[in-house]
Amino acid sequence: MSGRALRTVLPGLLLIAALALLAASLPAFGASRYAQTLVYYLAYDIVLGQSWNLMSGMTGYVSFAHGALAGLGAYATVIAMNAGWPVPAALAGGCLASVAGSFVVGASSLRLRGVAFTFATLFFQQLALLILRKLPLSGGPGGLALQDILPLALPQILMVALAALATAGVLILRRSRLGIRLLAIREDEDAAAALGIGVTRLKLGVFCASAAIAGAAGAAHGLFTASLYPDDVFSVDVSLTALAVPMIGGMATAGGPVAGAALLVGIGELLQIFAPSLHLVVIGALLLAVVLFMPRGLLPFLAAPLRRLSAAPQPAAERGTAP
């Protein structure tokens, strides 16, 4: 990244660091357990959204596998912890398990396009669920519990740090040459290939990178929940959340998943009080509204008038010249 591009993203990076430090300091400020849990799930949705955003938002390949990739990270981490691994090694093992899963599905399906690729990732989601239900190592349908009791602050701080790092990574990527190549694939893959971009290799690499982020989110979440059940961990709801967060907030942007996660978590809390069974219905309605009226997402939609205002020519009197 050039010095000019770095100066452009520096204010955003400082803002991300400040918000992450504030969120991680909530226990020191005496925040309630409810507030800490709310911030944790906000960070969790941000990490899931950024992982999906890195792959699908930047390349246009819509994936339903990110929930399963996060689930692989969660299971691998808890299994490693129960085997006596230290926490850092267990977390790394969870990320590697997700990357391995993404390599398998990516190498076999990234030559597909459009709906065919989406269905291939959905098949992987269901296949992972069936396998985990049968494996004795994973506890089968009865689930798996973490044997060690860890401080609750550990996964909370870890998830906030992951949200900050993932958001900062997408922010930097958008200003880099690699980001431009990924966006070129999204706009016209054949033209990108004609320009000499190794599209298949690049798609597989970014898919594995996004899987590492999803796996890290799942690994931290496994430590937070301390008990895993395959039907919950590999639920399509998780993949739908990973998809909805950037689609609602704004795909291929760093701030879009943050805005989308904040909106979904806020609505989710309200629905827990008034209509807990309507969660998926509301997410579907939001996605439909975004597709119809804000195809670029909420954040770009709100930023567009400000951008037009700042680009408007100034009157002569404001420029300091005579009318």
Image: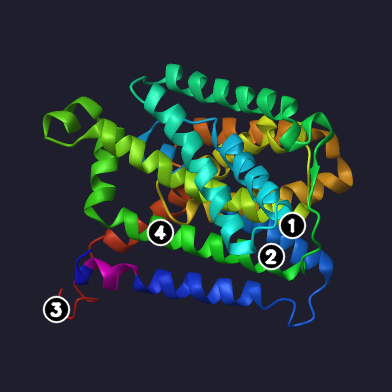
Q: Which circle, 4 or 3, is nearer the viewer?
A: 4
Farthest residue toward the front? Answer: 84
Question: Which amino acid, by three-letter code, is at mark 3?
Answer: Thr
How dense is the environment of label 4, judged by Cα within 10 Å: few (below 14), some, or many (20 and up)? some
Which numbered marker is on residue 224? 1
- For marks 2 and 3, the one nearer the N-term is 2
Image spot of residue 159 (x, y percent): 62, 61
Which-is-in-front pick, marks 4 and 1?
Answer: 1
Image: magenta residue range: 5-9
Q: Is residue 137 left or right of residue 20?
A: right
**Disc 3 vs disc 1: Cβ atoms closer than 8 Å?**
no
- CB within 8 Å, label 2 to label 1: yes
- Name the residue rendered at 54%, 61% in the picture: 162
Q: Quadrant of the C terminus?
A: bottom left
Q: Which residue is mark 3?
A: 321
Query: What amino acid is found at the position of numbered circle 4 in the picture?
Result: Gly
The residue tagged 4 is 169
Residue that carries the numbered disc 2 in the rendered image: 156
CA–CA distance in space, label 2 to label 3: 56 Å
